């Protein structure tokens, strides 16, 4: 049951981890004043926001492991809606992607991250993970999948923890590279930041389309039970 629960959350967790904006944000924070302190606080906020969101969904849909329950039906309809929303957002991101020769600039709000306060770094991490609409959809889908496998108590806790850690892996990785790698790490992270800025629309579109189709399919399969 634990293996099933972990397998069910991995696609959504990877989609959260591969979202370009938190990775760009953490790299900019690490490169700024008080980068080490603010980077750690951003990471704490990110993990806390993702963990709280997942825990709330598990609590709300606690009865979804029974296919005949209202919670299960709501979860399946929610998946159908979420899958459609993600696919629409993916098409929109693809349609609005910059041209091949277009110059991509760092958004203004990101450019201001090199001088954030400790509190803002903490709150920003929590908001980008727990209150970001795309992440909320992905977290809700992952947490509902955990419940539907029938995982309880320790298995449930482990599965949610795996989701949070995998979803936080790119942010955690950036902080560890910064802490351990010195100047070489700064150069590497800057190249990652530039790559993510340049290709953020394409990465976002592909991730949203693939995961949206998967979530939509799971919802339809659940409704057909």
Image (cartoon, helix red, strand yellow):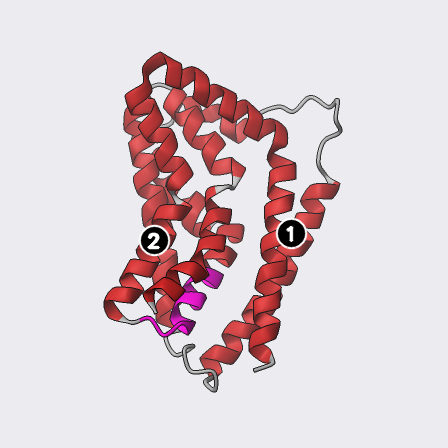
* Secondary structure state at the residue bearing disc 2: helix
In the rendered view of the protein, which quadrant contains the N terminus? bottom left
Is 211 or 130 nearer to us in this picture? 211
Residue 145 shown in magenta: yes
**Is the residue marked by circle 1 packed among few (<14), some (14-19), or many (20+) residues within 10 Å?**
many
Q: Dividing the image into 4 quarters, which one contains the C terminus?
A: bottom right
Q: Is residue 96 above or below residue 14?
A: above
Based on the displayed image, in which of its 4 quarters is residue 126 positioned?
top left
The circle drawn on residue 151 is: none
| Label 2, residues with CA under 10 Å away: few <14, some 14-19, many ≥20 | some
- Observer able to see residue 120: no
Q: Position of residue 108 (x, y in %)?
A: 55, 27
- Which percent across, then down, holds residue 209? 64, 52
Residue bearing the label numbered 1: 209
Measure the alpha-carbon separation of dots 2 and 1.
23 Å
In the depicted view, which residue is nearer to us: 210 or 84?
210
Q: Is residue 105 magenta?
A: no
Relative to the observer, which residue lies in front, 171 or 214? 214
User: What residue is shown at x 44% (from left), y 22% (from top)?
Assistant: 189
To which residue does mark 2 refer?
162
Q: Which residues are magenta?
A: 140-151
- Give x and y (percent) for residue 54: 38, 59
Answer above or below: position of 185 versus 54. above
**Residue 137 appears left or right of 166:** right
Q: Is residue 58 visible?
A: yes
Q: Are marks 2 and 1 in contact (CB under 8 Å)?
A: no
Residue located 40% across and 26% down the image: 29
> In which quadrant of the rendered view does residue 27 lie?
top left
């Amino acid at each position: 049951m634990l293996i099933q629960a972990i397998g069910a959350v991995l696609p959504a967790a990877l989609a959260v981890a591969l979202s370009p904006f938190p990775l760009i944000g953490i790299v900019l924070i690490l490169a700024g004043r008080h980068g080490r302190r603010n980077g750690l606080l951003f990471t704490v906020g990110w993990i806390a926001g993702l963990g709280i969101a997942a825990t709330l969904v598990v609590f709300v849909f606690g009865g979804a492991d029974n296919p005949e329950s209202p919670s299960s039906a709501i979860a399946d309809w929610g998946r159908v809606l979420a899958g459609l929303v993600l696919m629409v957002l993916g098409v929109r991101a693809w349609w609005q992607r910059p041209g091949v020769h277009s110059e991509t600039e760092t958004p203004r709000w990101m450019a201001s991250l090199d001088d954030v306060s400790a509190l803002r770094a903490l709150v920003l991490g929590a908001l980008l993970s727990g209150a970001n609409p795309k992440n909320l959809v992905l977290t809700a889908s992952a947490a509902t999948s955990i419940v539907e496998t029938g995982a309880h108590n320790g298995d449930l806790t482990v599965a949610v923890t795996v989701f949070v850690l995998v979803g936080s892996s790119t942010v955690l990785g950036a902080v560890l590279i910064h802490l351990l790698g010195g100047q070489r790490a700064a150069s590497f992270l800057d190249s990652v930041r530039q790559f993510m800025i340049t290709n953020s629309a394409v990465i976002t579109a592909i991730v949203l389309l693939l995961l949206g189709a998967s979530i939509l399919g799971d919802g339809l399969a659940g409704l057909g039970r």
